[in-house]
Amino acid sequence: MTVLAPPARLGDHFGGRLGFLGLALAYALLVAACVVSLLAENELSLGRNPLANLVKTAGEFARPSFVDVWFGNPQLEYRSDDGNLLRVENRQEVERNHLTALAEATWTTIRIATLGSLLGAILALPLAVLTARNLLAPRPLAWLAKGLLDVTRSIHTLVFGLVLVGIVGLGPTAGILAIALHSLGSYGKLFAESIETLDMAAINAVRSVGAGPVQVFFNAIWPAVLPQFVSSHLYIWEFNIRDSTILGIIGAGGLGLLISEATSLFQWGRLSTVLLVVFLLVTSFDAMSRRIRKALL
């Protein structure tokens, strides 16, 4: 005998729609409040001559500085307003030196993202085991681990970087630790969700023969979740490649330092070159991570 599910109540249907409309209305009011308040404070101004500034900046972006390695003026003269010669510069040599510095900064960014991601993954693993609900860890430890993951995930990498630069000083170490601490929360959440999808029958079978927690983890949990762990690690590593490019702005090393220098001096051609390197770096890593994830399937 087939038992049919009762039809959905008309009131529930309209109640769901009214609830959604209420949320949409609240969101619209929030957007309106943001716009009106900014207009009242005169904070939505585009400045003077925005179109001319846009055209000028776009023109400088369209000619990345690296082309000066071949086409730069080897006898570029800088003169004062009254016509006095201040100095003569070889643009080709200057840009070759800049490209050398750019290569070093790129390597620093890769090291920061790689070591920071690995450290974050290692630190997150025991916390993920404690927060996975199906493993039934002691409740106080589970709450403490979940609170730590939530805190680290809610604080931006730049905030960690600012604090750590003051603690360990300028350089890549602060960047590595900042990436690790922020990634800790994301790794822990993804790892815990992977563990919660496991079939508990295999875990209980290992427990039933007297295996301890460490043996249960390495014999029943680790082999099953390793592909998901690797996929999560690649995803966050790829994100950290992008995130670490700006850490140099606060003194943590890498491409961010060159970005900060270019923007502060309005050198849009050099900024264009740096951004091209960032684009190639992220695109190459994305292609590599896709191939690795495909091999894990």
Image (cartoon, grey):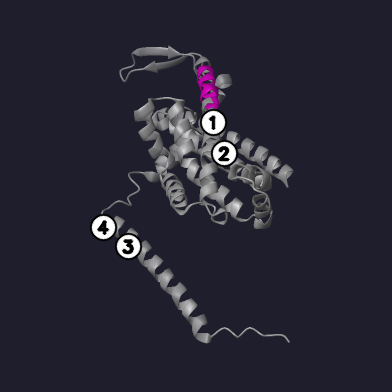
Quadrant in the picture for the N terminus: bottom right
Spot occupied by residue 120 in the image (x, y as percentages of width and height): 51, 38
Q: In the rendered structure, which segment of residues is drawn in magenta? A: 96-107
Spot occupied by residue 136 in the image (x, y as percentages of width and height): 54, 55
Question: Which of the numbered marks, if any, corresponds to residue 237?
Answer: 2
The Cα–Cα distance between marks 3 and 1, rounded to whole angstroms, is: 43 Å
Residue 111 sits above or below residue 82 on the image: below
Residue 37 sits above or below residue 266 on the image: below
Which one is in front in this view, the residue at disc 1 or the one at disc 4?
Answer: 1
**Residue 99 among magenta residues:** yes
Looking at the rendered structure, the kind of residue marked 2 is Trp
Circle 2 packing at 10 Å, graded few (<14), some (14-19), many (20+), is many
The Cα–Cα distance between marks 1 and 4, rounded to whole angstroms, is: 47 Å
Question: What is the secondary structure assignment of the residue under circle 1?
Answer: helix
Q: In the visual, does 79 lie left or right of 219?
A: left
The Cα–Cα distance between marks 2 and 3, rounded to whole angstroms, is: 38 Å
